[in-house]
Amino acid sequence: MRKEPATLQETIAELQADRAIREGLARFARVLDTKQWHALAEVFAADLTFDYGLGEHSGLAALEANMRRFLDVCGPSQHLIGSITVDVAPGSLTATSRAYVQARHQRPGDTGGPVFDTNGEYIDRWTLGPQGWRITRRDALWQTNSGDAAIIWSGAD
């Protein structure tokens, strides 16, 4: 089946969505690395669902708890998000993105010490609402981990 050429307006809307989604992913990385948990709402919808490999969860409070569980116990981190693809559903208010993530975590107060690295992929569903594009569903698929896991894992649940 041959796809009809997009109108100029549709093309502009798709490009705007693509840019907003890429900016949202970049914002997310910076939120994590600065531990500005209140700013998660700038990237995620309040009613999001997600799975970071620890089972199904929903809501911003659960997402914040998940992030804090690992990042509040470590020192500096750097989350790099790249190789991004964005598929905007034509004529709709939804999109899907896939992005690789590489995250480095350091032990608090030990800048020359061991690190813990994680590598994987975020698969996100986005919806355009009154506040802009927000992630409504995230699946994090982790491929590799290396280093000292105790840097992000206090062992307490």
Image (spheres, helix red, strand yellow):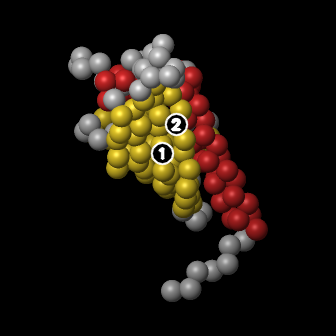
Q: Which residue is mark 2?
A: 79
| Side of 32 relative to 116 (left or right) | right
**Quadrant of res 151:** top left
Q: Is residue 155 left or right of residue 93?
A: left
Please tell me which residue lies in front, 104 or 43.
Answer: 104
Circles 2, 1 touching at the beta carbon (< 8 Å): yes
Residue at x 29% of width, y 41% of height: 53
Image mark count: 2
Quadrant where the C terminus sits is: top left
The image position of residue 144, as x and y in percent, is 35, 46
Please give the name of the residue rendered at 59% of the width and 63% of the height, measured from the top-left corner.
91
Tell me the residue at 41%/37% (across/down).
Answer: 117
Give the residue displayed 54% in from the left and 27% down from the top: 33
Mark 2 to mark 1: distance in Å?
7 Å
Q: Earlier in the sequence, mark 2 or mark 1?
A: 2
In the depicted view, which residue is nearer to us: 15 or 113?
Answer: 113
Residue 90 in the image: x percent, y percent? Answer: 58, 65
Under circle 2, the secondary element is strand
